[in-house]
């Protein structure tokens, strides 16, 4: 049985126990939401505890802190020194200058930028960011939330995409959609959250395990 080469990020975890369970299943990245408005929000103190445990037990897993339209001075304050995360994921309306400043000030932390896709034209706006980020994440557009809506991007927007940096697909990723994703869309990674949840921030570990098994069989 050959394993898929597609990377898997499980996002929106809120407990150390579930972060360890998901890591054991084979996740390549763990995402924690640092956005207070989110139902999956985790305080800085708890996030650090979870990430420090992962750093000790699963050092090769990327530890991703998800922020949204955060004042850049606060980003710099939180990430200089000895941060517990390996990646900052910008999931708001941050512009190129914002990305450039973080890249200059914190060169040792990976920088991912999420883009919410409402129409095909939104994809055309991504190109200028490629020089300033380490990865691109495409998420679905929703008027009520910046992420975790469970909505899918239209597949027709996603075929034959080429970026100079690795890219991740988010938004309603479930077992039912994965065959098409792997065959026709071929992202470098899948960012999965709401489709494996019992409630926001609480993952269904059995469903998560089934998802990993399904991916390993493809």
Image (spheres, rainbow, N blue to C red):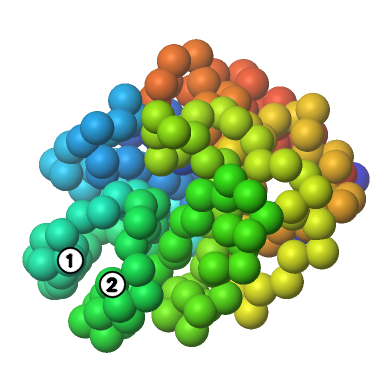
Residue 168 position, x and y percent, is 60, 56
Q: Residue at x 71, y 58 (%)?
A: 187
Residue 216 or residue 154, whichever sits in front: 154
Quarter-wise, where is residue 15 in the image?
top left
Q: Kindly tell me whether residue 147 is visible in this rendering.
A: yes
Compared with 192, 182 (above or below) is below
Considering the image in quadrants, where does the N terminus appear?
top right
Determine whether the residue tagged by mark 1 lies in a helix, strand or loop: helix
Residue under pointer 1: 72
Q: Is residue 136 above or below residue 179?
A: below
Element on which disc 2 rests? helix
What's the residue at 64%, 21% (across, down)? 207
Task: Judge left or right: residue 211 versus residue 208.
Answer: right
Disc 2 crowd, CA 10 A, few/some/many (<14, 14-19, 20+): some
- In the rendering, at what x and y percent does residue 171 appear? 59, 38
Q: Earlier in the sequence, mark 2 or mark 1?
A: 1
Tell me if 180 is positioned left or right of 15 in this view.
right
**Percent x, y of residue 58:** 44, 52
Which residue matches tag 2? 98
- Residue found at the far top of this picture: 198
Residue 181 at x, y = what percent? 79, 46
**Side of 61 relative to 72 (left or right):** right
In which quadrant will I find the C terminus? Answer: top right
**CB within 8 Å, label 2 to label 1:** yes
Q: Which mark is residue 168?
A: none
Vertically, is 112 above or below 13?
below
Q: Tell me the residue at 81%/57% (across/down).
A: 159
Query: Does residue 189 appear in this view?
Result: no
In this rendering, would 129 be left or right of 216? left
- Report crowding for label 1: few under 14, some 14 to 19, many 20 or more residues within 10 A (C-alpha): some
From the viewer's perspective, is residue 195 above or below residue 79?
A: above
In the rendered image, which quarter is residue 106 located in? bottom left
């Amino acid at each position: 049985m050959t394993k898929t080469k597609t990377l898997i990020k499980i996002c929106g975890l809120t407990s150390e126990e579930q972060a360890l369970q998901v890591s054991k299943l084979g996740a390549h990245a763990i995402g924690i939401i640092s956005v207070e408005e989110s139902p999956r929000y985790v305080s800085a103190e708890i996030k650090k505890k979870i990430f420090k445990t992962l750093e000790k037990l699963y050092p090769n897993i990327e530890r991703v802190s998800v922020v949204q339209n955060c004042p850049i001075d606060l980003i710099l304050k939180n990430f200089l020194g000895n941060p517990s995360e390996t990646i900052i994921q910008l999931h708001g309306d941050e512009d190129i200058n914002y990305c450039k400043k973080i890249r200059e000030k914190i060169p040792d932390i990976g920088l991912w930028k999420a883009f919410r896709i409402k129409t095909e034209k939104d994809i055309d706006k991504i190109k200028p960011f490629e020089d300033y980020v380490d990865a691109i994440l495409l998420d679905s557009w929703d008027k009520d939330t910046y992420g975790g809506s469970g909505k899918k991007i239209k597949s027709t927007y996603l075929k034959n995409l080429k970026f100079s940096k690795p890219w991740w697909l988010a938004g309603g990723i479930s077992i039912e959609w994965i065959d098409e994703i792997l065959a026709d869309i071929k992202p470098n990674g899948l960012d999965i959250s709401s489709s494996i949840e019992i409630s926001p921030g609480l993952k269904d570990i059995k469903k998560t395990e089934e998802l990993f098994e399904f991916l390993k069989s493809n």
